[in-house]
Image (cartoon, coloured by chain):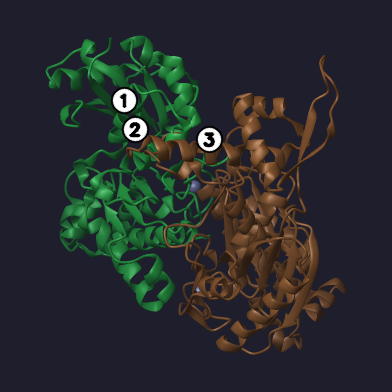
Amino acid sequence: MTGSLVAGVDIGGTKAAALVVDEAGETRGRAVEPMAGRSATGIEPIVAAVRAALEAAGAGDGDLGAIGVGVPGRIDSVAGTVSLATNLGWHELPLARLIRNEFGVPCGVANDVGLAASGLIGHEIVRGARSLAYVAVGTGIGAGLVLDGRLHQGDRGLAGEIGHAIADPDGAVCRCGQRGCVETVASGPFIARRAAAALAAALATGTPPDAHPLLTSGPPITAKTVYEAAAAGDTIALAIAHEAGRTLAHAIEALMLTCDLELVLLGGGVAGAGPPFLEPITAELDRARSASALVALMIPPGSVRVLPEQFDAVARGGVALARRLIRTDPPNPLHGDTEEEVVARASWT
Amino acid sequence: MIERSGKATHQETRAHNSRLVLGTIYDRGPISRAALARSTGLTRTTVSDVVSDLIRDGLTREVGRGPSTGGKAPILLAFADDARHLVGLDLGESVFRGAIVDLRGEICSAIEVAVDDRDGNQALERVFSLVDQLLARADRPILGIGIGTAGLIDTTIGTVLEAVNLDWHGLPLGALLQARTGLPVYVTNDSRATALAEHVFGGQRASNLVVVKVGEGIGAGLILGGRLFQGDGFGAGEIGHTTVRPDGDACRCGRLGCLETVASTRAILGQLASHGISRLPDAVAALEAGDPLVRDVVVAAGRQLGLAVAWLIGVLNVERIVLVGSAAEFGEPWLSAVRETMWASALGLLADGTTLEIGRPHADGVVLGATALLMTRELGLNLTGLPDAGLEGAVAGESESDDLEISA
Ligand SMILES: [Zn+2]
Ligand SMILES: [Zn+2]
């Protein structure tokens, strides 16, 4: 018999974050491990993060009932395999099996943003919404879509790819090879790069360094520095934040006009900057609302929000997935159990 | 999960079984009771009970015997395509078209009336008179009325929230017609109706399908996970009002530079006005005659649409896109422009394997889709019996009754 705790894991390009939750839904432990230095299969940081979170909960392997893992990439969630995760260098990795072998409990693997979006359904923070998107803004930009209460993954599990929509055909070259993707304006690395370039240009024309104290002092510029500088009124940072916000607002607006969502929730490292990140988005959406009754109707105020920085939506989605893996009642399609859950539970019980 | 009483669960199960069996007969008939039991996973007894009810209702017929597999040759069951008549209406931009349709989407009789004014009351009178004429022509029990119209529609109550062309605002069209005829009435947006027509009557039933209608305006109908997706406020697919040129021309929605202002048939004709062309047939003729200016305008509009299609592919990862509406009359030069831009701007992996085509060139897409909505809702036809349809909901939260829903 397995334990009563479940773990949710958010795997990112730089770190694995684990969350351990008890049967009552209370968070019992958290831990973060760097992804650097991992081997080719790369599961050591995941295992370490789960064990550290268990330890923080005053528990051990034997208390664990199931694990749900969110991975940025293309996932075969029935097989529990990572088909392709470019940022992690994973290709056809049987991640669920590797983790299951390590802990001896069921493990489910899913795309991170989809997992976050599906985990948000039913949470009080979404107030009963049935159609929503979780938009992660960090190293990359992607959306997880829940439509009419069902996760929409698309024909090949690639839905929600809004980061590579073209925002500016004459813009910078993106890591995907296209020019002017949304990511080239609004992702963390590009925000940092644009700010550094704008700063260099300003300094080259004779602007004194102390005109931009937060950007010119300390370590290399990151998206975090840019938003801190924007919050402090730095003109270069404000311009970059404004441009990123405007571009994200257009993508969100198009997403809502396409899918008529009740709610868009923003998360991820860059969104963690909070108000200086959200304000330019809100300003652009307000402009659109005042110009168009249709936009005002379909994107009402309050329908685009930033999740609290500590909310860890992906790990929470992992927890929800883990719970479904150990649910004891027999699967019943009439009660909304999906074919995959039936398959998943049949193979693990 | 909501607790259910034993009785409610029993009735739901019965209704669910009936939909499942009817849907299977619809898609795979003629079929024997034994094969039905195999393919639905229901017991032979359950299948026999359900089939008796369906035969009594006239929706299913016994149509002879199939090949024997050892014992007595099994009796085959077929869907009775002509058991009911459906009334379908397409309240189009300049023409109202109505038809009597059978359960397989065959048009039995059709009527068209021109609509040249923009008076909401007169438009409603025309709808009433069209329905009266069609009902007089039906010679089977009428299942109900399905309507496709431009605009924002609340499908659950059949109310037209906003239809600029017809000057209807908050018009309870469904309730008015229901009171007048005593028949069930379903109303949906024209792009969505066309998507449903492709899904239900189109032959190959893809789990995910997007139909983009390009005419006076631009809208998309989305079939996702085998079901019509309408969105939180029935606005899903309003891609015509996404901004493509922030400093562009004024759109009828109040903003500048919407997709409609650069890629709709109206936008194309607007640009050709100074060239002395104001009607679509003239523009198509000039294009076919090789007029370079017309060609440039049509190709530019196609490219803008291609960007929108690339966006749809990226957001929804849908591999089948069908283009319909009056702009499709520009044919291959327009389609190529859309396709090339889609390829150039959607991620390689996503555009790979995506098919983009112009929909079947008949005028009845909206009529058929409206009747498909009516048919799937009224008969509860379960047409989502695709091998992977259930997987779409994989990790989503508890869905209460949605998985019991039929395809529409
Ligand atoms: Zn890109
Ligand atoms: Zn518009």
In the picture of the structure, the residue carrying the numbered disc 3 is B390
Residues marked 2 and 3 touching at CB (< 8 Å): no
Q: Are marks 1 and 2 in contact (CB under 8 Å)?
A: yes
Question: What is the chain identity of the residue bearing mark 1?
Answer: A
User: Where does the image place residue B83, in percent across and percent down from the top left?
Assistant: 74, 53
Q: Is B402 on the left-hand or right-hand side of B198? A: left
* Residue at mark 2 to residue at mark 3: CA–CA distance: 29 Å
Residue A343 screen position, x and y as percent:
49, 22
Q: Position of residue A319 (x, y in %)?
A: 29, 30
Give the labeled residue for mark 1.
A35
Using the rendered image, report if marks 2 and 3 lie on a common chain. Answer: no
Q: Going 48% across and 53% down the picture, which residue do you hit? A: A181
Q: Earlier in the sequence, mark 1 or mark 2?
A: 2
Q: Nearer the viewer, residue A240 or B38?
A: B38
Marks 1/2: CA–CA distance:
8 Å
| CA–CA distance in space, label 3 to label 1 | 34 Å
* Rendered residue at 61%/88% (across/down): B122
Q: Considering the numbered disc 3 on the image, is that residue within a helix, a strand or a loop?
A: helix
Can residue A152 be spotted in the picture? no
Type of amino acid under label 1 = Met
The chain under label 3 reads B
Please give left or right for residue A103 compared with residue B269 in the image: left
Query: Crowding at label 3, few (<14), some or many (≥20) Cα neighbours within 10 Å?
Result: many
Q: Secondary structure at mark 2?
A: loop
Residue nearer the viewer, B283 or B67? B67
Amino acid type, callout 3: Gly
Q: Residue tagged by mark 2?
A: A12
Q: Nearer the viewer, mark 1 or mark 2?
A: 2
Chain that the image shows in green: A
Q: Amino acid at mark 2?
A: Gly
- Which image quarter: residue B350? top right
Mark 3 and mark 1 in contact? Answer it, CB < 8 Å: no
